[in-house]
Image (cartoon, helix red, strand yellow):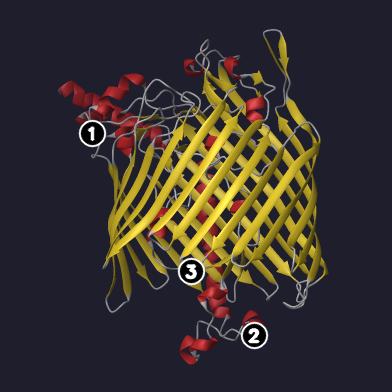
Amino acid sequence: MIQMGITKTALSKSALRMRMTSNTKETRKNIFSVKVTILCLVLFQCHLVLAQKKPSRISRELGVAEVKDSTKQSPKDLAKITDYLIISHDNDTTYVDTTLSIKKEYKFNYLRKDDFGVMPFSNMGQTYNSLTYNFQNTKLMPSFGALGKHFNYMEVEDIYYYRVPTPLTELFFKTAFEQGQLADSFFSINTSPQLNFSIAYKGLRSLGKYQHILASTGNFRFTTNYQTKNRRYIAKAHIVTQDIYNQENAGIRDDNVEYFETGEEDHLDRSIFEVNFENAETMLKGKRFYLDHAYSIVQKNDSLDKNHLSLGHILSFEDKYNEYSQTASSDYFGDAFVSSGLKDRNTLESLYNQLHLNYSNNIIGDLQFNISNSNYNYGYNKLVVLNGETITNRLKGDVFSAGGKYHKQYKGFDLSGELGVNIAGEFDGNYIKGTTAFKLNDDVFASATINHSSKAPNFNTLLNQSDYINYNWQNNFSNIQTQQLAFQIKYKQLANVSVDYATITDFVYFAQDDATLQVRPFQYGGTINYLRVKFENELRLGKFALNNTILYQNENAEGVMNVPDFTTRNTLYFSSHMFNKALYMQTGVTLKYFTSYYMNAYNPLISEFYVQNTREYGDFPMLDFFINLKIRQTRIYAKAEHFNSAFTGYNYYSAPNNPYRDFTVRFGVVWNFFL
């Protein structure tokens, strides 16, 4: 026992030294940029507050009184919360919401969106294992791949634009694991009623509880939108730069699994566990420039005008790469061409241009016709000769497409549809989607959607090069064909039921090769039938509420696509105003559970999940305890999260003898400032 104690102490100190030396130049640079960004935003706000002793130009032009001097203004002169608009890339508009609700609790995480259906790894900033899939698709081009690195990668549809009567700021903060923090700073201002700018940065550093598992990420966003006074010309644009860095340890070693599952006291310190390697890192980095603008040729001046005609253009340029580096080769991935200094980097440069003609008529509805060009350049900077065969280094070319959209509202029905087809180029592809929605009243809503898609598999399944011999391939896969039929019906908060049924042909997936036992892509020649039924509701009794989300799934291709039969999240919570309504509080407990199934494993070399059929995981509860407070526009979050007993590194274990020992208490705050 004395020897065991000495070993544990030595290992702890060794692990601590290794973790302290993990502060690489890259992570220090990331933390510095987070601090500089927050400092600049705070100083900028202070400048604005001091500068607003006189009515600002935006207030004069919009006719909005200064919020700062609200004691001298009547309520009707003050800016309303509904005036602070948030605009999506397809022009859906909402407004800033500073309320505290259970939905806000579900979104208070690293992704800043509801994470039902995904299972996080042991450290914030790592990847997520998907418990469910949605095969609805309206894309014509293959994606980059490396899907395990893209959960926090912001695509075009993740960027929002703003229109605010007074400057708006939001500051988000949440503690991380061991060392570091998560911060998201946002600022938006209208310099005139026609022109808006916003700037935001989300930065993370989290050391993690296991060895060599540090995560450091950054998402910088700059947006602007402009419209002329007569709204004849409208433009939206954004610049986004992102980097997602992870130390990779490939999970704890197999001979350490027993210590975790039995809950042995000497291994409750997770840094004691030995991992597969401690010399590997991954980095996903990308930048994007995006412009969407349109000019009205024939413009509606009021609701009585029948016709509207506009010409629009979308330009998007994106440059990204995913890199895996390792100081020395490891038997974990098999034989390698070199023994040290391994570095795999695949890049994608894509330029997208679309011209679209929009026509609107009171009788026929809204019509759009578009033509587009996609220029792509994916690959590597070298050729690989393997077993006498040459693996190319580039997939590049141009694809020309045509498509259209339609939308019409008629007597409570909302009809919409869109289609697209590649008419020239190396990649074939097409899709068609139609939706019918009906709103009987404010309480009842129903919709039906049909979608067909044919699209080439992701680039990294078609071509991959690596310093590890078994991770070099060039495939000529067929298009993946999907058909999906989806229904939804919603009645108040009592029930929200959605059902979708999909068939997938020529599905491409990652799995271990029987000969080499290494991971590579395969194409399934059969048809997968996939059914999902999701039920959501909330039951209230006084100040208590029970919020439920239950998902049932069924598929017929075990070994190709595995999902749990049931996934559930149930939250019992209490809500109440306190201190003469100066404070609003919510507190409760959330239960998460999914049935046992063959959960996908993760391969950090290619940043992809792969199907495994040797061990089942799940069938255990996870409990989160939370207390949330709202004081004016400030929301304060505190949560005891149950995470470690669900997973260790990259390998998931049910740990039946140790299901409730590991909780991490984390705190966070969201501030909103209306200047």
Residue 38: x and y in percent read 51, 60
Find numbered disc 3 in the image and state the secondary structure of the residue it sits on: loop
Q: Is residue 25 visible?
A: no
Q: Nearer the viewer, mark 2 or mark 1?
A: 1
Element carrying mark 1: loop
Q: Position of residue 409 (x, y in %)?
A: 65, 64
Mark 2 / mark 1, whichever is N-terminal: 2
Q: Residue at x 51, y 25 (%)?
A: 560
Q: Is residue 603 left or right of 337 when viewed as pictured?
A: left
How many marks can you see?
3
- In the picture shown, does residue 383 fall above or below 273? above
Q: Measured along the vertical axis of the image, is residue 522 above or below residue 124?
A: above
Q: CA distance from mark 3 to mark 2?
A: 37 Å
Residue, x 60% and y 62% (percent of image)? 413
Residue bearing the label numbered 2 = 60
Q: Which of the numbered marks, if any, corresponds to residue 442?
A: 3
Q: Are marks 2 and 1 in contact (CB under 8 Å)?
A: no
Packing grade of label 2 (10 A; few <14, some 14-19, many >=20) is: few
Front position among marks 1 and 3: 3
Snapshot quadrant of residue 237: bottom right
Residue in the image at 26% along x and 28% along y: 261
Q: Earlier in the sequence, mark 3 or mark 2?
A: 2
Which residue does the image show at 56% across and 51% down from the upper left? 448
- In front of the other: 575 or 286: 575
Whether the residues at callouts 1 and 3 have beta carbons within 8 Å, the answer is no
Residue 30 visible in the snapshot = yes
**If the image is split into quadrants, where does the N terminus sit?**
top left
Residue 36 is left or right of residue 364, and the answer is left
Residue 20 occupies quadrant? top left
User: Secondary structure beneath disc 2?
Assistant: helix
Q: In the figure, 618 relative to 392: above or below?
A: below
Quickly name the residue at label 1.
Answer: 658
